[in-house]
């Protein structure tokens, strides 16, 4: 709920605003990867993920691939890919065309 509230406070164009479902999947991803114990720590890591840049997280970093099953990462993956847990070939992140404005807002939230 906090991530959705945060998104709703931002003045982002629709091409950069993540859907509620995408926010939920990213929070679940952070919780699973880091084994966080509280919602607050998951939210903090969620903002860090966005602030570090999901497309540009480090020199030579792989694009973000979030998957909730054993489906292997595609060889030619580019951009951000968040698999729908039910329909794995559906990229939930496809609607966000530009991550820069969202990244800047997340960086401000991390301060």
Image (cartoon, rainbow, N blue to C red):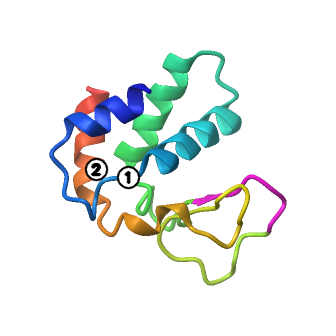
Q: Reply above or below: 81 against 85.
A: below
Q: Distance between the residues labelled 2 and 1?
A: 9 Å
Q: Residue 18 carries which label?
A: 1
Overall secondary structure of the magenta stretch? Answer: loop
Q: Earlier in the sequence, mark 2 or mark 1?
A: 1
Q: Residue at x 46, y 69 (%)?
A: 94
Q: Residue at x 61, y 84 (%)?
A: 76
Residue 83 horizontal side relative to residue 68, left or right: left
Q: Where is residue 21 in the image (x, y as percent from the top left)?
A: 51, 48
Magenta stretch encompasses residue 67:
yes
Q: How many marks?
A: 2
**Cβ atoms at labels 2 and 1 below 8 Å apart:** yes
Q: Which residue is drawn at 47% across and 44% down?
A: 23
Q: Which mark lies nearer to you, 2 or 1?
A: 1
Q: Reply above or below: 53 against 24.
A: below
Q: Which mark is residue 102?
A: 2
Q: Residue at x 41, y 51 (%)?
A: 19
- The secondary structure type at the circle numbered 1 is loop
Residue 45 horizontal side relative to residue 103, left or right: right
- Point out the image quarter for the N terminus: top left
Segment colored magenta: 65-71
- Nearest the eye: 52 or 70: 70
- The secondary structure type at the circle numbered 2 is helix
Q: How crowded is mark 2: few (under 14 residues within 10 Å), some or many (20 or more)?
A: many
Q: Quadrant of residue 44?
A: top left
The outermost residue toward the left is 11
């Amino acid at each position: 709920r906090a991530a959705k509230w945060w998104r709703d406070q931002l003045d982002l164009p629709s091409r950069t605003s993540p859907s509620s479902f995408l926010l939920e999947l990213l929070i679940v991803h952070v919780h699973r990867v880091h084994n966080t114990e509280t919602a607050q720590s998951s939210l903090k890591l969620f903002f860090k993920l966005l602030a570090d840049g999901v497309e540009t997280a480090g020199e030579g970093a792989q694009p973000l691939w979030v998957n909730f099953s054993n489906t292997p990462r595609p060889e030619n993956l580019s951009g951000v890919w968040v698999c729908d847990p039910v329909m794995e070939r559906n990229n939930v992140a496809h609607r966000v065309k530009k991550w820069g404005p969202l990244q800047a807002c997340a960086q401000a939230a991390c301060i």
